[in-house]
Image: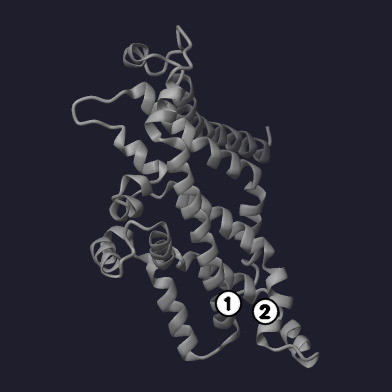
Amino acid sequence: MKRKQIQSIAGAVLLGMILIVYIVPIFSLLINSFKPYNEIMRSFIAFPEHFTFENYPKAWKALDFMRSSGNSIIMTIITLVVLLLTTMPASYQLSRTKTKFSSFLFNFFTMPYLIPFFAVMIPVVKMARDFKLSNSLLGVSVVNVGISGSFAIIMFCGFVKSIPRELDEAAYVDGCGKFGVFTKIILPLLKPAISSVTIVYALWTWNNFMLPFLLLTERSKQTLIIRVYDLFGMYGTDWEVVIAALILISAPIIVLYALFQKNIIGGLTAGAVKG
């Protein structure tokens, strides 16, 4: 057997093992969402002896699904709109300006990407409350962009640098101003990066727990992920309801990722050719 064949087989086996590691927890959650409580406690990996669909209506009611999912959707949309409107023009200006100050600003804007949220959690929450941004989906979205927007700037800057400057110069010769160059030339070319950043941040925002948990104390403003946390009790937990709830909140984002996986990969690699 040739060396390349051995490497291919070994690679296939390794990928298969990694796939199993990822698939088994999801599959276990799925089959346990159709079990009654006593069967879950008896064996978490066994198939259901008696299928039941009662867990899902219970989870739907416990989550207040319509209200909390609406909050999650609103917060995600606001985050994406604020993020794109601020980071795209900023990244374009930073990428097209070659000065020490622009380099300083790029490093300044991207520094939060290197700092874990837990290191700045207390001052961020204190500032958010001082500026009356707590208990507001708009406020939480703005804070979310502030602490996580650096990744988008890195993405957009890398992509803009791969666009030849000659396109800008040709547009200037034709009479376009800087705003016209950005909207008519750069923005259409940014579509792969925009789709990638949009999907990545949609995933992050939908699954974001800590920031909404700290700032959204009013029950009517809470998102899905916080309502799942409320299902865990100090003295007992209805695991059949919790597992069904986890499936309910995971399903939309899994479908979204499956549909736009190519966009994510394409956008992440599109700006990596030239920098």
Q: Amino acid at mark 2?
A: Phe
Q: Is residue 117 left or right of residue 11?
A: left
The residue under the point 46% across, 66% down is: 149
**Tally of numbered tags:** 2
* Residue 161: numbered disc: none
In front of the other: 32 or 71: 71
The residue under the point 41% across, 35% down is: 64
Q: Is residue 235 left or right of residue 56?
A: left
Locate residue 197, reporting x and y percent. 57, 60
Q: Counting other residues with Cα less than 10 Å from the Cα at mark 1, is it few (<14), some (14-19), or many (20 or more)?
A: some
In front of the other: 113 or 246: 246
Q: Is residue 242 above or below residue 133?
A: above
Locate residue 248, reporting x and y percent. 48, 32
Quarter in which the N terminus is drawn: top right
| Image quadrant in which you'd find residue 180 | bottom right
In front of the other: 16 or 8: 16
Q: Amino acid at mark 1?
A: Pro
Residue that label 2 marks = 182
Between the residue at mark 1 and the residue at mark 2, the CA separation in whole angstroms equals 8 Å
The residue under the point 52% across, 52% down is: 202
Q: Given the current orientation, which residue lies at the most extreme top position?
A: 49
Tag 1 near tag 2, CB within 8 Å: yes
Q: Is residue 38 above or below residue 117?
A: above
Counting residues from the start of the chain, the first of labels 1 and 2 encountered is 1
The residue under the point 41% across, 57% down is: 137
Locate residue 224, reporting x and y percent. 41, 41
Locate residue 226, reporting x and y percent. 35, 43
Residue that label 1 marks = 89
Determine whether the residue tagged by mark 1 lies in a helix, strand or loop: helix
Q: Is residue 253 left or right of residue 117?
A: right
